[in-house]
Image (tube, rainbow, N blue to C red):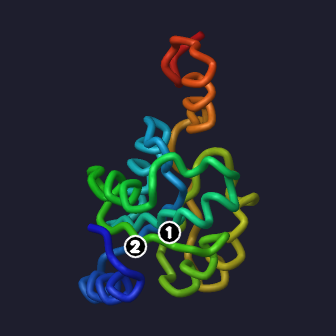
Amino acid sequence: MIVSREALLARVAEHRAQGQSIALANGVFDLLHVGHLRYLQGAAEEADILVVAVNDDAVVRRLKGEGRPIVGEAARAELVAALRGVDYVVLFGDLTVGPLLELLRPDVHCKGTDYTVETVPERAIVEAYGGRTAIVGDPKDHSTRDIVAAIEGGSGRPAGSPA
């Protein structure tokens, strides 16, 4: 379910009142691929409720450059919300997920395997409120960048396939 920040806070409060734990994962999720799926499946295993924060289009352009995102924020949010294990999706317009972490205070902040717990930029925020950081998903050998390169280069090989 795609929700506003305000609605998310209310729903998370309801889940906490029922004794449920909350995990937060975040990302761009442009050209949804198997790496995204495995990351979110891993995140869903960390808590009772999974919230996914999706970067809005303006932030994606700042982070990834012109020409990105390929898929607009509303469609990206809808695709992520449709995945099994994802309870809520919220769009966010900050360069980092830090402000949302401080507001939501999830029990678990989930990041992909391109990080270690020690290298997660928001680790100090999570530790400050007593949460934990989890590294989830499979090895980072899938990327939207590689999919785009395969399409542009006409390799004829699906991204994530052996060479």
Residue lying at 56% horizontally and 33% vertically, measured from the top left: 142
Rendered location of residue 93, percent (x, y): 57, 74
Q: Is 118 located above or below residue 33 in the figure?
A: below
What's the distance in space between the residues labelled 1 and 2, CA to CA?
7 Å
Q: Are marks 1 and 2 in contact (CB under 8 Å)?
A: yes
Residue 47 vs residue 121, the one in the foreground: 121
* Helix, strand or loop for disc 1: strand
Residue lying at 54% horizontally and 67% vertically, measured from the top left: 109
Residue type highlighted by circle 1: Val
In screen coordinates, is 115 left or right of 33?
Answer: right
In the displayed orientation, state which residue is furthest to the front. Answer: 67
Residue 96 vs residue 43, the one in the foreground: 96
* Helix, strand or loop for disc 2: strand
Q: Is 151 located above or below residue 52 in the figure?
A: above
Rendered location of residue 83, percent (x, y): 30, 50
Label 2 Cα neighbours within 10 Å, binned few <14 / some 14-19 / many ≥20: many
Q: Earlier in the sequence, mark 1 or mark 2?
A: 2
Residue type highlighted by circle 2: Ile
Rendered location of residue 17, percent (x, y): 28, 89
Q: Residue 100: which numbered mark, if any?
A: none
Rendered location of residue 77, percent (x, y): 38, 60
Residue 48 vs residue 67, the one in the foreground: 67
In screen coordinates, is 45 left or right of 132?
Answer: left
Residue bearing the label numbered 1: 108
Pick the quarter of the image with the N terminus: bottom left
Pick the quarter of the image with the C terminus: top right
In screen coordinates, is 127 left or right of 22?
Answer: right
Residue bearing the label numbered 2: 22
Residue lying at 51% horizontally and 11% vertically, measured from the top left: 156
